[in-house]
Image (cartoon, helix red, strand yellow):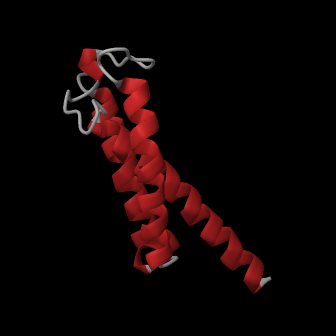
Amino acid sequence: MVEEYLFAASAAAVAVVLLELCVLRTGLFRRPAYWITMVIVLGFQVPVDGWLTKLDAPVVLYADWAISGVRAPWDIPVEDFLYGFAMITAVLLLWERRRAAREQA
């Protein structure tokens, strides 16, 4: 499949947003702490991912057919940001759901 990483990362991001808005409803997206957390994650993701995916000496290689080819900043495939958002947000949503269940018990 062409650009399969872009499709998978986009689908994961959309699925996580829908999970929050339609199922879990934790209110996570309304919390400033969540958005501060995402800025902190980006603060670490950009230099590390930039080093791992830099085009002049990559540690991680992506098949040309699997990604969109859009890279920013420092040669980071944009798909990595979607994947990171989905992964971190899913973990935080499940953590919040577990915390709420414990408080009700």
Residue lying at 76% horizontally and 77% vertically, measured from the top left: 102
Q: Is residue 85 left or right of residue 69?
A: right
Foreground pick, 66 / 15: 66
Q: Quadrant of residue 98?
A: bottom right
Foreground pick, 91 / 101: 91
Residue lying at 41% horizontally and 28% vertically, measured from the top left: 51
Q: Is residue 68 above or below residue 64?
A: below
Image coordinates for residue 16, horizontal then vertical, percent: 43, 57
Which image quarter is the C terminus in? bottom right
Residue lying at 52% horizontally and 71% vertically, measured from the top left: 24
Number of numbered discs overlaid on the protein picture: 0
Q: Is residue 50 left or right of residue 70?
A: right
Q: Quadrant of residue 79?
A: top left
Residue lying at 35% horizontally and 46% vertically, measured from the top left: 82
Image coordinates for residue 97, horizontal then vertical, percent: 62, 71
Image coordinates for residue 62, horizontal then vertical, percent: 35, 19
Which image quarter is the N terminus in? top left
Residue furthest out toward the right: 105
Foreground pick, 39 / 79: 39
Q: Is residue 33 above or below residue 1?
A: below
Foreground pick, 89 / 100: 89
